[in-house]
Image (tube, rainbow, N blue to C red):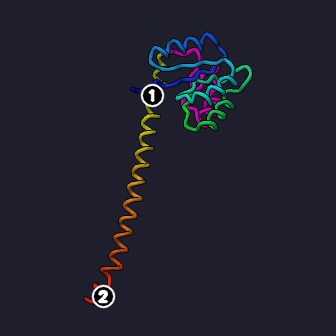
Amino acid sequence: MMMKKKILVIDDDQKLDQLLKDYLSKFGFTVTAYTHPQQGLKAMKRDNPDLIILDIMLPDANGVHLLEQFKEIDPNVEIIMVTAVKAIKTAVEAIKLGAYDYIVKPFNPQELLARIKSQLELKKMRDKLIAANKKLEQVMDGASILASDIGHKFYNELWPFTQMI
């Protein structure tokens, strides 16, 4: 059985938080939402979410600084930034710091859902690629050891015979 993906929402708009919880839950996500950044930070450490939806402009914290804190805790956590202000400079900064995407309020919930699904699918493929790469490295290490053993055996056992020819 596949586990539900966990989404953490941190936005000071309680109505939006509840709307996102209700909407995304319909699609099989486990959603927790907080209006205060410190609560969200604690939840992130405790719950290990698959994706975070983070408001850039919070009353008692800067969302970009919070993004940095989340990435320090878990560099692989996926983050979508949301804001009511269309500031390209802030969006570029957030993406450089590791945010996956940036969406401006008001947004269509279907668009957000599509972005969430897309990012989680990319993460799943990236995780599979990393696992396959690790397996390949193990196989290559084994092949290298085998080749070294064969070379050593050739040198020690067969090389003297080649000198007699």
**Residue extending farthest top:** 15
Label 1, on which residue?
118
Q: Which residue sits at x=35%, y=79%?
A: 156
Question: Which mark identifies residue 9?
Answer: none
Q: Secondary structure at mark 2?
A: helix
Residue 108 colored in magenta in the image:
yes
Count of numbered marks: 2
Instruction: Identify which amino acid the numbered label 1 is placed on.
Output: Ser
* Residue 160 vertical placement versus 110 (above, below): below
Q: Nearer the viewer, mark 1 or mark 2?
A: 2
Instruction: Identify which amino acid the numbered label 2 is placed on.
Output: Gln
Side (left or right) of 41 relative to 137: right
Label 2 crowd bin: few (<14), some (14–19), many (20+), radius 10 Å:
few
The span shown in magenta is 80-109
Label 2, on which residue?
163
> In the image, residue 148 lies at what x, y percent?
39, 69
